[in-house]
Image (cartoon, rainbow, N blue to C red):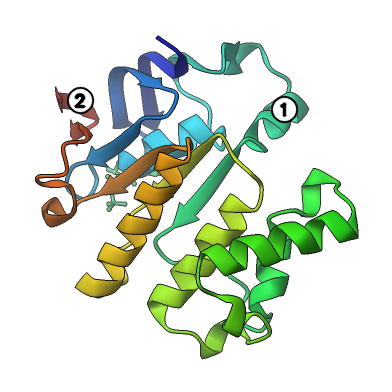
């Protein structure tokens, strides 16, 4: 089995004593599509932030591609993060900038040439149906389009893993289904997906692994 991410007894405590995650152990195999579910406050965002290396666990160990976070310097963790893309509920796009400029931001730290950047961005905009929107400002787009731009910004990095935190939380049912379909396509191409949602209709009958959190603990893994 080709394990991509391992969590061993990971806990995260926020002051004064909020246990956001409580001894979570989990293995994610390369190429898996996993729903992280649970109600508000269950610990979904905390779990994704820890895997992304944005925060450190209070105890326990996390590794990605056999590299243990605990042993990594901040700059090496930043390098590891280049293999990941993050998609947020509220998009986190620059509304006064164009679609192209926002996707370009995904590439900034990767240090690739302007020519290669243009090629990658055009290709990703084409596959996400955004070519006609390329020069529009973000504020002119619908919610579903904004989330597609945010996915494009993640995908342009050619990541191993996409972490999506309630990516459909601000979208209507049809746009939500579209976003889920895009994630499934990306997964079919080999990208591992962690998709956090509290929306049961999205993961029911999908025959995907579901990791259900309740008060920071894993209740079911199926
Ligand atoms: N930076 C922080 N400081 C203090 N408490 C926090 C912090 N981040 C999260 N928490 C708390 O940790 C618990 C888990 O929060 P988390 O955001 O991970 O849950 P969630 O399942 O993603 O919920 P939601 O869907 O509402 O975002 C909650 O009780 C939350 O209030």
Task: Tell me the SS state at disc 1.
Answer: helix
Q: Residue at x 21, y 41 (%)?
A: 37
Marker disc for residue 218: 2
- Disc 2 residue crowd, few under 14, some 14–19, many 20+, Cα 10 Å: many
Relative to 118, does residue 186 appear above or below in the rendering?
A: above
Relative horizontal placement of residue 203, taking residue 32 as reference (left or right): left
Q: Earlier in the sequence, mark 1 or mark 2?
A: 1
Circle on res. 74: 1
- Looking at the picture, how far across and down is residue 19, in whole percent? 29, 30
Instruction: Name the secondary structure under disc 2.
Output: strand
- For the image, the number of numbered tags is 2
- Asked if residue 98 is positioned above or below residue 186 in the image, the reply reads below
130 lies left or right of 181: right
The picture places residue 95, in percent across and down from the top left corner, at: 60, 80
Residue 169 in view = no
Q: Is mark 1 within 8 Å of ligand 1?
A: no
* Label 2 CB sits under 8 Å from any ligand 1 atom: no
Which quadrant of the frame does ligand 1 lie within?
top left
| 122 horizontally vs 162: left or right | right
Residue 42 in the image: above or below residue 156? above
Q: What x and y, as percent, mark residue 15? A: 40, 35
Q: Which residue is at the front of the view, 213 or 134? A: 134
Instruction: Say which residue appears at 70% left-offset and 63% top-offset.
Output: 121
Residue depicted at x 24% and y 31%: 216
């Amino acid at each position: 089995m080709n394990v991509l991410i391992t969590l061993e007894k990971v806990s995260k405590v926020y002051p004064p004593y909020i246990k956001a995650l409580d001894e979570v152990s989990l293995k994610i195999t390369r190429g898996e599509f996993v729903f992280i579910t649970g109600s508000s406050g269950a610990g979904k965002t905390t779990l994704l932030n820890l895997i992304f290396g944005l925060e450190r666990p209070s105890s326990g160990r996390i590794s990605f591609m056999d590299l243990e976070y605990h042993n990594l310097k901040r700059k090496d963790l930043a390098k590891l993060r280049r293999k990941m893309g993050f998609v947020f509920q509220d998009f986190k796009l620059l509304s006064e900038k164009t679609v192209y400029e926002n996707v370009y931001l995904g590439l900034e730290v990767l240090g690739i040439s302007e020519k290669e950047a243009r090629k990658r961005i055009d290709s990703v905009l084409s596959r996400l149906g955004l070519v006609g929107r390329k020069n529009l400002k973000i504020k002119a787009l619908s919610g579903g389009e904004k989330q597609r731009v945010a996915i494009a910004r993640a995908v342009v990095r050619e990541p191993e893993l996409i972490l999506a935190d309630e990516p459909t939380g601000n979208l209507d049912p049809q746009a939500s289904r579209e976003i889920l379909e895009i994630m499934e396509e990306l997964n079919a191409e080999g990208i591992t997906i962690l998709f956090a949602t509290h929306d049961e209709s999205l993961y029911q009958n999908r025959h995907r692994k579901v990791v259900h959190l309740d008060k920071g603990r894993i209740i079911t893994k199926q």
